[in-house]
Image (spheres, rainbow, N blue to C red):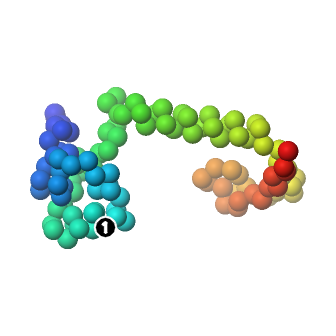
Amino acid sequence: MKLDVYTAHYDENCWLRPKEFIPERFDTESEFYKESTKQGKVKNVYSRRIFSHGLRACPGMTLGVLQIKIIIAYLLMKIDYDIDEKWFSKEGVGFGLGSEISVPFTVHKL
C-alpha cells in the first residue's frame, strides 16, 4: 500500500485552511481545532500523522528526545540533592512513568 502523506495533510475535507501554517490545528484544546470540528472537518488516521512512523519517521523527533535525555542527565549530575533512604525500601517506588509514588527529594543551593 502506498500512502500519500502530502495529500493527506492538504485535504480540504480534513483541515480548515489546509495551505496555511497554523500549528494550533493539531492542538485539541485550541480554538482553531474546535472551529474546524464545528465546520465538520473530520480527521482521518493518515491526516493526523505529524511525525510519521517507522523508517520514514521525522529525524527531528529522535534528535529532540535525545537532547531532552542529555539535558536531564546533565542536570542530575550538576544539582546537589538528597533522597531519604526509607523511600528506596518501599514497594512501587521509582522515578519513571510506572512508579506508584513520587519520591520527595531536597535540592541544595550551591
From the top left corner, tell me how far across and down residue 70 is, in percent.
Answer: 62, 34
Residue occupying the point 18% across, 58% down = 16
Tell me the quadrant of the picture where the C terminus can be found. top right
Residue 56 visible: yes
Q: Secondary structure at mark 1?
A: helix
- Judge from the rendering whether residue 40 lies leftward or rightward of residue 90; answer left or right: left
Q: Residue most toward the right?
A: 85
Where residue 107 appears, as percent x and y from the top left, is 81, 52
Rendered residue at 85%/50% (across/down): 108
**Residue occupied by mark 1:** 31
Across and down, in percent, residue 78 comes to 77, 38
Q: Is residue 89 visible?
A: no
State the count of labels. Answer: 1
Q: Amino acid at mark 1?
A: Glu
Residue in the picture at 31% in, 67% down: 31
Q: Is residue 63 left or right of residue 44?
A: right
Residue 99, by quadrant, is bottom right
In depth, the one of 37 and 90 nearer the eye is: 37
- Residue extending farthest to the bottom is 38
The front one of 21 and 43 is: 21
**Residue 79's image quarter?**
top right
Residue 84 image position (x, y, % from top left): 86, 55
The N terminus, quarter of image = top left
Quick check: 47 above or below 63?
A: below
> What residue is drawn where x is 28% and y is 56%?
25
Q: Nearer the viewer, residue 42 or 2?
A: 42
Left or right of residue 58, residue 47 in this image: left
For disc 1, the neighbor class at 10 Å (few under 14, some 14 to 19, many from 20) is few
